[in-house]
Image: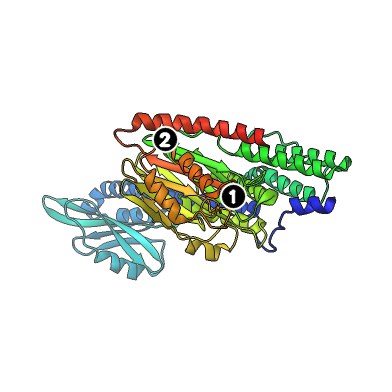
């Protein structure tokens, strides 16, 4: 009995060498935090340098003014001792590299803290000086950049001499060195705090998924006594509670040694789980009416669909088909839908398009699915504000565009999910932006519709589907699935469907059919509930 349980609940092992979602999340978050800390530190040091330079230059200009005014009379009187003393006194300031006073008769008084003073004095004297106001100019001296501040002394339009002061960067560099060391220590401290928080948050977010995966593997090995008991109200909690319930039911059946009853209970739980994962009602989308149909070939299905709101007033429509039927196909469908919802919740800031969502979904499914298993999925994003539709399809049947002018196939190139690695999957996946005119619509479906066979083995076929879709194009979105399924049942006769059948219709309101479409949407929503109830009664 345990061998059969393992066969039904078998989960693929994680691909060796494939980085886990925890590792990728921590790595991405850590790189982001490091980048932010480095950018902030660099920006702070740059602003600090600018502020220090402005402060030093203002101080140097003030020193020059004071230097010139206090020695004005000495220069006029040619008081050599006072002028010589003045230049030596002013260079005691840590920011001043040199001081130079030149007279109109080429007498000069010079003092500096730098080497090769004579050559420096000669270079300073050739700097052009304004005769009316103070001026400043950059001066390259050896490996240091100096700012020369100069002012001429003019009495009765007669130049008597010039005052020069040189501002050095040494003081600025020393302050910045201290600030850089402090910034490094603060950044390191903040980085350690943020990395600890990231590790804690990512572990907290990923842990339930790892628990569910490990619990599912344990169920596949026949360990039915363990329970998750996750107290969550989202899809992850719902899946965990369903697994716990499934384990309890299987354990009861195993203890009673009733093989047939055990399988019946197991499939019933899986069927209920799938029904709960389907949307209970259709969303209200401005200017759009919706219709849907879902029919599993067995107690459980590998098909699923979903219609849900997205950010910025957009809506998502998903139709998927697992390459497999029965419990295994239903299990993969549940994993696919839960993984997709988890990506939308945890990576909402990163996901910008249907294509990016399918790439992320393929990365996770490729790690967990067996080689022979894959999922085809069409993801259509509706943007009512822009009147725009964006489609990405991973190996799914072509989207059908129908309206008064007939039916047109809209192919969207892309491989199936979980079949190939990202390096091949991502370049092969394309995304299309399409539009609808009033009265036109889109038709999404799984291949169980076109591959339905009659008693002689003949398929219903895509050509017959497009003809009927063109015929029913004027009907409401909620009525089209019922009209089509009636034609399929008439074609197949008493023979039941061999595969799961799913249909979703998106139709844009025409001016004369707004009221009719509103009633059709309400009818479609009510029909979902009735169909689920009728299916329960049939079982």
Q: How many residues crowd mark 1 within 10 Å: few (<14), some (14–19), many (20+)?
A: few
To which quarter of the image does residue 113 belong?
A: bottom left
Q: Residue at x 57, y 31 (%)?
A: 530
State the image coordinates of residue 160 (x, y, percent, origin top left). Answer: 18, 56
Distance CA(mark 2)–CA(mark 1): 53 Å
Where is 89 relative to 285, above or below?
A: below
Is residue 423 in sight in this rendering? yes
Q: Position of residue 201 (x, y in %)?
A: 64, 43
Residue in the image at 11% along x and 52% along y: 157
Q: In the figure, is residue 519 to the left or right of 84?
A: right
Label drawn at residue 285: 2
Depth check, mark 2 against mark 1: the one in front is 2
Q: Residue 185: which numbered mark, if any?
A: 1
Q: Nearer the viewer, residue 357 or 417?
A: 417
Q: Position of residue 87 (x, y in %)?
A: 34, 56
Mark closest to the chain's N terminus, 2 or 1: 1
């Amino acid at each position: 009995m345990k061998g059969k349980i393992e066969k039904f609940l078998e989960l693929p092992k994680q691909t060796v060498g494939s980085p886990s979602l925890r590792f990728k999340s921590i790595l991405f978050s850590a790189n982001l935090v490091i980048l932010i800390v480095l950018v902030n530190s660099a920006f702070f040091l740059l602003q600090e340098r600018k502020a220090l330079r402005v402060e030093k230059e203002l101080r140097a200009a003030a020193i020059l003014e004071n230097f010139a005014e206090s020695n004005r009379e000495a220069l006029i009187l040619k008081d050599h001792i006072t002028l010589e003393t003045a230049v030596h006194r002013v260079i005691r300031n840590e920011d001043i590299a040199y001081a130079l006073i030149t007279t109109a008769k080429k007498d000069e008084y010079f003092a500096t803290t730098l080497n090769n003073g004579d050559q420096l004095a000669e270079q300073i004297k050739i700097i052009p000086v304004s005769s009316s106001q103070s001026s400043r100019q950059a001066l390259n001296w050896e490996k240091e950049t100096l700012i020369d501040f100069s002012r001429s002394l003019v009495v009765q339009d007669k130049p008597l001499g010039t005052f020069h002061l040189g501002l050095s960067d040494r003081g600025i560099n020393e302050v910045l060195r201290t600030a850089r060391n402090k910034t490094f220590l603060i950044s390191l401290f903040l980085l350690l705090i943020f990395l600890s928080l990231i590790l804690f948050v990512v572990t907290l977010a990923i842990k339930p998924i790892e628990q569910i995966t490990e619990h599912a593997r344990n169920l596949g090995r026949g360990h039915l006594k363990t329970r998750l008991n996750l107290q969550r109200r989202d899809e992850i909690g719902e899946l965990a509670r369903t697994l716990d319930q499934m384990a309890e039911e299987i354990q009861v059946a195993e203890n009673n040694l009733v093989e047939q009853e055990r399988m019946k209970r197991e499939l019933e739980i899986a069927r209920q789980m799938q029904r709960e994962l389907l949307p209970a009602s259709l969303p209200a989308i401005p200017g759009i009416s919706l219709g849907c149909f879902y029919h599993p070939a067995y107690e459980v299905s590998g098909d699923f669909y979903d219609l849900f709101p997205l950010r910025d007033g957009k809506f998502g429509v998903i139709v998927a088909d697992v390459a497999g039927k029965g419990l295994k196909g239903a299990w993969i469908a549940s994993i696919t839908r839960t993984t997709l919802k988890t990506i939308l919740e945890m990576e909402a800031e990163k996901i910008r398009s249907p294509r990016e969502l399918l790439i992320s979904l393929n990365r996770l499914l490729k790690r967990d699915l067996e080689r022979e298993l894959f999922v085809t999925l069409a993801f259509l994003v509706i943007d009512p504000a822009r009147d725009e539709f964006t489609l990405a399809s991973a190996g799914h049947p072509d989207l059908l565009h129908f309206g008064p002018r007939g039916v047109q196939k809209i192919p969207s190139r892309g491989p199936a999910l979980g079949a190939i690695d990202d390096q091949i999957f991502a370049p092969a996946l394309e995304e299309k932006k399409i539009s609808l005119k009033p009265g036109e619509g889109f038709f999404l479906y799984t291949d169980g519709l076109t591959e339905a066979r009659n008693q002689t083995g003949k398929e219903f076929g895509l050509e017959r589907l497009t003809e009927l879709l063109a015929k029913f194009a004027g009907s409401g979105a909620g009525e089209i699935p019922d009209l089509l399924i009636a034609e399929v049942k008439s074609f197949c006769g008493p023979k039941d469907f061999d595969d799961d059948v799913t249909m979703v219709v998106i139709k844009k309101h025409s001016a004369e059919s707004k009221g009719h479409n509103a009633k059709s949407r309400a009818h479609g929503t009510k029909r979902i509930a009735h169909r689920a109830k009728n299916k329960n009664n049939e079982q």
